[in-house]
Amino acid sequence: MAEAATGVGRFKSNYAVERKIEPFYKGGKVQLDQTGQHLFCVCGTRVNILDVASGTMLQSLEQEDQEDITAFDLSPDDKLNCMLPQVLVTASRALLLAQWAWQEGSITRLWKAIHTAPVATMAFDPTSTLLATGGCDGAVRVWDVVRHYGTHHFRGSPGVIHLVAFHPDPARLLLFSSAADTSIRVWSLQEQSCLAILTAHYSAVTSLTFSADGHTMLSSGRDKICIVWDLQSLQATRTVPVFESVEAAVLLPEEPAPELGVKSAGLHFLTAGDQGTLRVWEAASGQCVHAQRQLPGPGQELTHCTLARAAGLLLSVTADHNLLLYEARSLQLQKQFAGYSEEVLDVRFLGPEDSHVVVASNSPCLKVFELQTSACQILHGHTDIVLALDVFRKGWLFVSCAKDQSICVWRMNKAGKVACVAQGSGHTHSVGTICCSRLKETFLVTGSQDCTVKLWPLPEALPSKSTGPDGGPVLLQAQATQHCHDKDINSVAIAPNDKLLATGSQDRTAKLWALPQCQLLGVFSGHRRGLWCVQFSPMDQVLATASADGTVKLWALQDFSCLKTFEGHDASVLKVAFVSRGTQLLSSGSDGLVKLWTIKNNECVRTLDAHEDKVWGLHCSRLDDHALTGASDSCVILWKDVTEAEQAEEQAKREEQVVKQQELDNLLHEKRYLRALGLAISLDRPHTVLTVIQAIQRDPESCEKLEATVLQLRRDQKEALLRFCVTWNTNSRHCHEAQAVLGVLLRHEAPEELLAYDGVRASLEALLPYTERHFQRLSRMLQAATFLDFLWHNMKLPTLPAAPMAL
């Protein structure tokens, strides 16, 4: 294969997490502050606080018990009692209540709820001084959050208390609650008793809301009716059938709002329910005066609705955990937030500069995120779960396919707004994979569970928005259909020249086809299990396949032979992509790992572990400097190529080491031992420090020099020196230097100071056995030397005879 990158420096070596799109809302209560600037919502053990303008998470609050949050409430902005700061109170499954200074993210008070079962609901009174909690034990308790004591305990409700609300007039001291018996109880805080039981609903009461003057209350229920109550007589004055199970109802301000059909100043209210539309009703006539357009697909049922009157904003929540923010007077959509994506099935970069990402999750909706601002768009077009995505070369146009057997073509404009411009259908089963033409925006190919591949030509000039015959998307027709495999087709890929098509199937084979006639050219056989992904190399005539057998294989297009096999994943490999101009591979698996491979030597360069479940989505940016992954843990991660940064950092470290080594040599030459020893310790290299100690010992006045130098070190330097002594002491050649330093420390440092050193116990435990061994060795050597000396002094040399003298 021709290599595009010859130098090792061009290969990637590592990716780092740059951005993570995580779930922040998994169901339950949501609340806006009265300014409309902050959004509060529950996510398991945490209450998350979002900045509405940017969509970024400001705080994530978790109680010390780390149990699930069962209820929370934010105190109102109280104009009468402005000295009190706005507080947040949360209740956990551990039966603890926590009062937060949420701007700082700190708990100011923690106390027991006294309920015998978890708190299911809570509400502040208008003055922000009283807090009512309703428990699963059927009890209602009232707390004074300013003076920190419980004021009331009301019993008598059967089952779970799922709704509590104070009367808007604090002087009346009335508390309303609703439990499993479908009735509404009115409690008097002054008389500490139940004033009345309002019975008109036949199913669970889901919301209570009050008029501004406090004379009227509106209740909604799952019995498909809303009831208007007169709070003077505590009687129902009007029952309005709304023909849907209502999860929330909101009383609108008594002022004309022509865009909502409110023409008179009478009582009007808005409902949100299982039909997935916001509807405005006139209480006097019981007529619906305005209704939103209903969106297609499941998961659009509304589960919550709340009004921030001061900000003029209305917040609704869908069953898919999407949060929609509207302008209250016109119901114009202002913001969208995707709270929980569940299982992410595919991800793609969008835009010519990869400024956006599109996410397909376990939902009929697509989510488009702007990376810079965290803004989110939720796209509706499919009626069943979207399974796969792909994007055309320029980045403005992208496509999706779904379980509803259809495909959609979407266009993003320069403002970042996305619209569906074309649709097509023709498959008889779920469409599980889709691929766009590579050179121009001319056609796309789909693969389905019906074992066929379809080629869809695109009109030469697709509109920038929906402009079909009836104002909807343009309808696409398949140009060619080919039965390709015996089992589900999991992946299709189009070659960079748009002339070849590769298909991967559950039947354990990949096939190569000629476009546009879809003529079979060859079969790639060798995997032991089904294939999840096929991908053409951008540079070479090579095909990569990822399989459930845990391997990635490279195949030659000329003879259909297997060139290389990459083994390393412990489970199915779900996606594969070429990077570094075709010289490296990225693969993702059901083990939650992403691996970077170098093709030339079959080496796994790096394993990226940031997901906790199957990584279904993998896509690389145009500049090849970022990667995007999406997984079943509902997280989308943006990875940044940090190879150059790490190499530059490593080079800078090497240069710094060289400079310091030269400085160290100069200091030793000048006999400036204190600075030399400090510099050597800062390098964190035991051998370099040993060299300095040896240089000091070679000095004629070594004993005094070593002692003076060691004692002038800082405490952290002495701690490091003690650790180095442990290393030196393991070697008989260097034990003398270790013992010399150790002797200085033991002679001049108090035992209390030595015991306060970081890691001193571990160091002493490591020093003792080797020190004993050295002592024994030296003792034996001393004995041997003494014996030798004794022999030398007691040796009797034989007396040699005197030589005869010459005559």
Image (spheres, rainbow, N blue to C red):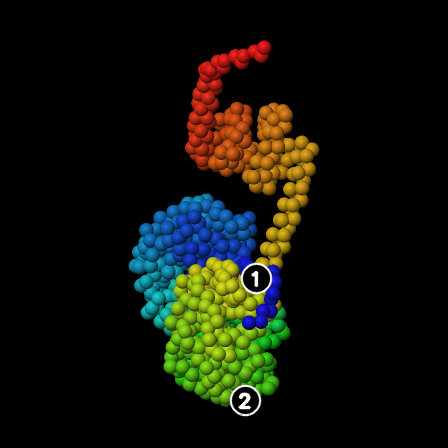
Q: Residue drawn at (56%, 39%), measured in percent from left and top?
A: 687
Q: Quadrant of residue 495?
A: bottom right
Looking at the picture, how far across and down is residue 497, in whole percent? Answer: 57, 80
Report if residue 629 is visible in the image: no
Callout 1, which amino acid? Lys
Looking at the picture, how far across and down is residue 133, in whole percent? Answer: 39, 54
Q: Residue drawn at (35%, 71%), measured in percent from left and top?
A: 223
Of the image marks 2 and 1, the number of the one nearer the N terminus = 1
Label ID, residue 469: 2
Number of residues whose C-alpha sits closer than 10 Å to that of mark 2, classed few (under 14), some (14–19) or many (20 or more):
few
Q: Height in image: 796 above or below 487? A: above
Marks 2,1: beta carbons within 8 A = no
Looking at the picture, how far across and down is residue 447, in whole percent? Answer: 45, 80
Q: Which of the pair 496/295 is nearer the observer?
A: 496
Label ID, residue 12: 1
Q: Residue drawn at (58%, 12%), measured in percent from left and top?
A: 806
In this rendering, the count of numbered labels is 2
Callout 2, which amino acid? Pro
Q: Residue drawn at (48%, 86%), measured in percent from left and top?
A: 518
Q: Quadrant of residue 622?
A: bottom right
Q: Height in image: 396 above or below 157? A: below
SS class of the residue under badge 2? loop
Quadrant housing the C terminus: top right
Q: Which of the pair 187/603 is nearer the observer?
A: 603
Q: Height in image: 736 above or below 219? A: above
How far separated are the C-alphas under marks 2 and 1?
A: 50 Å
Report if residue 733 is visible in the image: yes
